[in-house]
Amino acid sequence: MVLDKRLTPTERIANRLGYMGTAFIMVSPYLLPYGNVGAITYVIGGIISTPQVWVAKQWNLVAVNANVTIGYIIYYFNG
């Protein structure tokens, strides 16, 4: 009744990138007071966490990551 599914190499690397991107996004609010470092870590986190949700076909989170990335790129260039 339970399917023993092993992750493909693409899924494994996407998951690892997703965890690292999430860590960048979690740390970013604390770095915003120190200039543009917080904005840069938001952009990096949004970009490197996108493969995980893309592979999982979670299109709403792909849109959220694109929104975070574009928004903080605009913030970086206006700041």
Image (cartoon, rainbow, N blue to C red):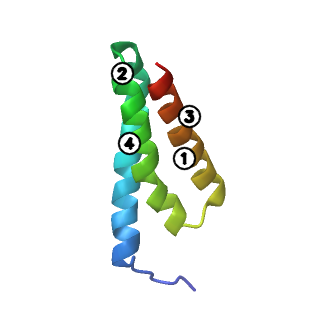
Distance Cα–Cα, label 3 vs label 2? 16 Å
SS under mark 1: helix
Earlier along the polypeptide chain: callout 4 or callout 1?
4
Is 53 on the left-hand or right-hand side of 40?
Answer: right
Up-down relation of residue 17 to residue 1 (above or below): above
Earlier along the polypeptide chain: callout 4 or callout 3?
4
What residue is shown at x 52% (from left), y 59% (from top)? 53
Numbered label attached to residue 31? 2
Numbered label attached to residue 25? none
Quickly name the residue at label 1. 65
Q: Give the mark toward the camera: 3 or 2.
A: 3
Viewer-nearest residue: 18 or 63: 63
Q: Position of residue 67 (x, y in %)?
A: 59, 42
Numbered label attached to residue 71? 3
Q: Position of residue 5 (x, y in %)?
A: 45, 81
Viewer-nearest residue: 15 or 60: 60
Question: Which picture quadrant has residue 35?
Answer: top left
Numbered label attached to residue 44? 4
Residue sitting at the far top: 33
Viewer-nearest residue: 45 or 73: 73
* Mark 3 and mark 2 residues within 8 Å of each other at the beta carbon: no
Q: Position of residue 47 (x, y in %)?
A: 43, 49
